[in-house]
Image: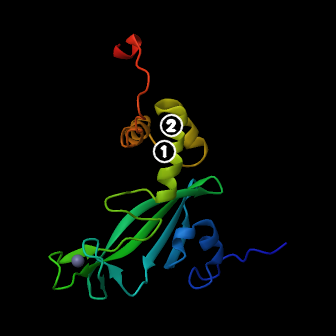
Amino acid sequence: MGIIVLHASAGENACCLRLFCPALREMDVLNVEDLGDTMLIAARTVASEAPCPKCGLPSTRVHSRYRRTVWDLATGGRAVKVELEVRRFCGEPSCDREIFAEQVGGLTRRHARRSTALRTLLTSIAIALAGRAGARMAYLVGVPASPSTLLRTLRALPDPEIGKVTVLGVDDFW
Ligand SMILES: [Zn+2]
């Protein structure tokens, strides 16, 4: 059985973090702090370029940096909060998008405060248990979410496609 090497400097060797939080694989981990029921990870993006969300052309010209917070799946039963330093890039002159923010695959999405994996988990909990019971389950698995958040998640789901109607009964009008 292999041994998982604990991160020594939270830099290049932060391999256990990358195992537990795969979304951090492409990032510089700056610091890890144990806050009791939450693990706080400070990280920054290092990719040399980012694609424009409008035209898809990559840009290497950094406009500015800013911080954002994203919650990820729990690790060891504890919530994982990632404080990310991300960049805004200048768009290409051929595109009317002058500035855009970079996104980290699997972790960030425009305006979202939860990672893709966490949103998927909360959506599954909401589908199975809805608001209050779902909130209790989410708390137990280390990803606290309020009943209203879970219900919002349900409402945001696309409507299921209605198949071709072959037989229509009187009851279908009620
Ligand atoms: Zn563009």
Q: Position of residue 24 (x, y in %)?
A: 52, 72
Residue shown at the point (52%, 57%) measured from the top left: 117
- The answer to whether residue 36 is above or below residue 20 is above
Circle 2 SS class: helix
Badge 1 amino acid: Thr
Question: Which amino acid is tagged 2?
Answer: Ile
- Most extreme residue toward the top is 170
Of residues 105 and 43, which is closer to you in this image?
Answer: 105
Quarter of the figure with the C terminus: top left
Residue at the extreme front of the image, as rendered: 166
What is the distance, in whole Å, between disc 1 and disc 2 at their CAs? 6 Å
Q: Residues within 10 Å of mark 2 (few under 14, many from 20)?
A: some
In the picture, measured across the screen, residue 172 lies left or right of residue 41, that is left
Check residue 123 in the rendering and tell me which mark sits there, or answer none. Answer: 1
- Residue 127 tag number: 2
The number of callouts visible is: 2
* Mark 2: C-beta under 8 Å from nearest atom of ligand 1: no
Q: Secondary structure at mark 1?
A: helix
